[in-house]
């Protein structure tokens, strides 16, 4: 971690809670941008899975079964 980052962290910690929250939200928003390449890959994956299902190569699973599998 660079000294510049450490300094920014110290400055952020000195802010009042409301300002720290605003800072965090702004930083997170700056990271939350869709990547067109990833979106395209997911769209292709969804299309491939649907096609496999329609060809009978992929079975559907009931949502209730999936949820039950992961419930404690």
Image: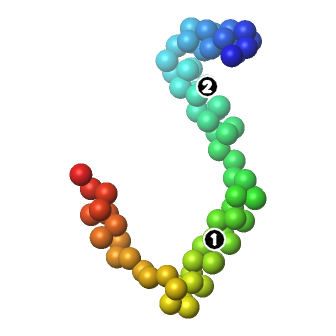
Q: Is residue 52 above or below residue 66?
A: below
Q: Is residue 18 above or below residue 10?
A: below
Q: Is residue 61 left or right of residue 58?
A: left
Crowd around label 2: few <14 · some 14–19 · many ≥20 (10 Å): some
Residues at marks 2 and 1 touching, judged by CB atoms closer than 8 Å: no
Question: Which of 3/20 is in front?
Answer: 3
Residue 9 % position (x, y): 62, 14
- Looking at the rendering, in which quadrant would you find the N terminus? top right
Q: Quadrant of residue 32?
A: top right
SS for dot 2: helix
Residue bearing the label numbered 1: 45
Q: Quadrant of residue 47?
A: bottom right
Q: What kind of colouring is applied to the model shown?
A: rainbow
SS for dot 1: helix
Residue bearing the label numbered 2: 23
Crowd around label 1: few <14 · some 14–19 · many ≥20 (10 Å): few
Closer to the observer: label 2 or label 1?
Answer: 1
Of the image marks 2 and 1, the number of the one nearer the N terminus: 2
Q: Is residue 61 left or right of residue 46?
A: left
Question: Which of 24/53 is in front?
Answer: 53
Residue 59 % position (x, y): 44, 82
Q: Quadrant of residue 30?
A: top right
Going by the picture, which residue comes out furthest to the front? 57
Question: Which of 9/60 is in front?
Answer: 60
């Amino acid at each position: 971690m660079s000294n510049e980052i450490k300094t920014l962290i110290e400055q952020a910690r000195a802010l009042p809670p409301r300002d720290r929250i605003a800072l965090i939200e702004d930083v997170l928003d700056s990271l939350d941008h869709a990547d067109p390449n990833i979106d395209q890959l997911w769209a292709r994956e969804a299309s491939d899975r649907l096609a496999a299902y329609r060809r009978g190569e992929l079975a559907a699973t009931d949502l209730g079964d999936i949820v039950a599998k992961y419930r404690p």
